[in-house]
Each structure stands twice: as C-alpha cells, then as structure tokens.
Amino acid sequence: MRILGTSPDAIDIAEDRRRFDAIARELGIAQPANGTATSVEEAVAIARRIGYPVLVRPSYVLGGRAMQIVYDDAQLRDYFERAARVSEERPVLVDQFLEDAYEADVDALADGTDVVIGGVMQHIEDAGIHSGDSACVLPPVRIPAEHQATMRRHTEALAHRLGVVGLMNVQYALRDGTVYVLEVNPRASRTIPFVSKAIGVPLASHAARVMAGETLASLGFTQEIIPPYLSVKEAVFPFKKFREFDPVLGPEMRSTGEVMGISESFGVAFAKAQISAENALPRSGALFVTVNDRDKVAATPIVRRFHALGFRILATAGTAAHLRAEGIPAERVFKVHEGGPNAIDLIASRDVHLLINTPLGKRAQHDDYSIRQAAIASKVPYTTTLSAALAAVEAIEALTAAAPGVRCLQDWHAALAAGRATVPA
C-alpha cells in the first residue's frame, strides 16, 4: 500500500520520545528536561530528577487528552491511578514544565526538498495551556525577531530531517532567551485554517497537491508571507452550555471552535476576536479582581491601566489590600463565605462588568470556582490568566482611542498582495 505524504515512520519518530530526543540532539535543538516512564515509580523518579512542576501525558494522543501539570509526588501518583494506562508500548511522557514562558506555534509546508514557513503564531495565554485553547496572534507581538528566526530554522531543520511531505506543526517555548521545542506534529494542525486566512494562501489545498507529487515551486509558494496587519485567533468554549465544567484552562483541550479578528493594531484585532467569540469587552464599568498571591505583583500594572481607563476596581480582601498599598483605589468585596453582598451577588446583579480571576496553585478554591460559574451565568466576560488580562486592557485602550472598522477578508488579502494595509479597520 502506498502512503501519500509524510511516512508513517516520521510520524512515529515525532511521537516516540526516545527516537525524537536523538534527532533533537543531532540537530542541536533544546528541549525541556524530560523522560519516559512505564510505571508510577519510574515517573516519580524522573519528576524528582527534573524538578516539579512537570507536565505528564500519554504517548500518541490528540487534543492534549489526559495531559496534566503536576506539582508533587502525591498528585503524580493520583494521575497514574486516574488517567494513565501505561505499558512498554505506551509510556507516559514526563517533561519539565516551563513556567513563565512564551509559547509559539509554527506551521510549515514541505515537499520533501523545500520547506516554507506558513506562519509563526505567539500564544496569548500562559504557558501550559493547550495550543487549541490559547488565543494567538500572527505575526507575534512579544517574541523578539532573533528568537522567531531560531524557531524558523529549527522548523526547517526538523522538516528536512523527518522527510516531511505536506504540512507540519511545531510548538515552541521561549524562556530566559532559550528556544525549546515542545512538540512536533508532522501533519496538519488545527491552526491551518487560521493561518491560511491570515496569509491568503490555501495551505491545506497546497499540501494535498504536494502530497500528490507537485512541488512548492510549481505552486508558486516559495517563501513565507508576513502580513502587514495582525490576526488574532480566539478559542470558543462550551462552558455556557455545559455549566458543570470549571472554565479554568490547562493542557487538555476544551474548546469547540475558533474565531479570528484582523486589524493593524493588536488591541483592535484582539477586541474583534472577543466580539466574535461572544465575549465582548466592556469599555467602562467595574473590574473585579481576585488573584492568587503569586500573581499580585504582576497583576498590579494591568489593574493600574484599567483604573486609568476609568474602571471602578473591586477586589477580594488580599488583592484589595495589595492594590491599595500600590496606590490603586480598590474596594473590598466579600468572598462567598464572608457574608454579603459578596462577589457572586455583585456579578448576578450586573454590578461587575469584567472579571480577572487567577486560581490558586494546583487546585482552584471553591470560592474561585463559584465566582467563575457566576460570571458565565451572568454573561460577564472573564479571564483566568494575566496574559489574557493584559491583552484585554490593550484591547479596551485601543477601542477607547478609536472605533474599530470593518473590512472583508478579500480586502485584507488585496492589501497583503500590495505589501501594506492602507485602510484602518
């Protein structure tokens, strides 16, 4: 039987940690410290060697199924009891979790000889959130050009080494000036429709023709297209319909759809994506903030920008005390168990217009869960990461400065063909 496109062996190399490690070392590509375990004791030993927190996942899965960030031995043992079916043929992968890293996706198309980058996308959500659930922006806005160039070189080297014929997706993390490869998928990624619309190239169609024997040169796709505008992809979640689920995001994919926004500015593009996802951001009103202790310092400049926009700042006791100490007026709001009117009462009465809630550590507290559920029930937009909160304030600042315009995708592509985006939108 003839297999079109990338060989099954190349796909196996990308999934088999031991085989892929050898190729990464050969190419000089950094990876997070990692190991493979076929028993819980072996996994514990690897995690202790690497250092917690670690990301654990089964081999050969899609959508981040049964992927989890674990913080100690007890949680790792619990993971094996609940989620992992382990054998020599199906080991569990244990990776160092790179906290406070920027993550990026790179899509590429190869014909067995040439490799062309489809797009480099910077994740907006924090590291550790599944790429299908994270908002992303193309081109990147916070990844330095030199590190983007490293990602492109690594992607091309991996495509050549694996003998990719068709599409390939590579996921990277950037921390402390080092680019790490997290995962290689020698196949089409869920980002292909987004990238195709952003750059005006039908990547899936091109991939099919390449797999059937045509070359990239014959298709006229020989170099990366970097648009002069910004495209933001946002995930759509089912939490309004499935209320029993906590909307906190993690390594296991939970989104059920995607939308995108395009503009010459990141803030407007992000705002358009939120509108499309039925999560429209308010331009004024009350911001309710409750973040864990670790996030208080990083949250302060974000909240300060909301205050400068005229938002009334509400916060739970610890967050309010911190903000007031930093010179930001913040009104204390009771937690659920502290009396009333509490946070849920204010959300239900529409006295809160935007929620920033980052859960505490490895398990969300009951109050946090109740607050997020109240926001969903009352259709109050919310963020559960500071990176998304930063994007939100940038979007509101952009909307305050000027009303967004509307352009059809064909007009954006016409501007792209001309090498410029001449009409604000």
Image: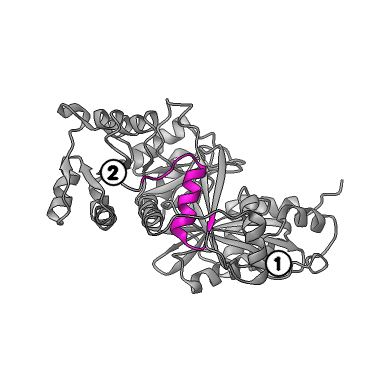
Q: Please tell me how crowded label 2 is: few (under 14), some (14-19), or many (20+) other residues with Cα within 10 Å.
A: some
Q: Residue at x 49, y 33 (%)?
A: 83
Q: Is residue 273 visible?
A: yes
For mark 1, what is the residue?
115
Residue 263: image x %, image y %?
Answer: 52, 59
Residue 30: image x %, image y %?
Answer: 51, 65
Q: Secondary structure at mark 2?
A: loop
Residue 46: image x %, image y %?
Answer: 43, 49
Q: Secondary structure at mark 1?
A: strand
Up-down: is 148 above or below 332? Answer: below
Q: Which residues are magenta?
A: 262-282
Residue 77: image x %, image y %?
Answer: 40, 36
From the viewer's perspective, tell me whether residue 190 is left or right of residue 394: right
For mark 2, what is the residue?
285
Examine the image and state in which quarter residue 27 appears: bottom right
Was residue 276 drawn as part of the magenta stretch in this picture?
A: yes
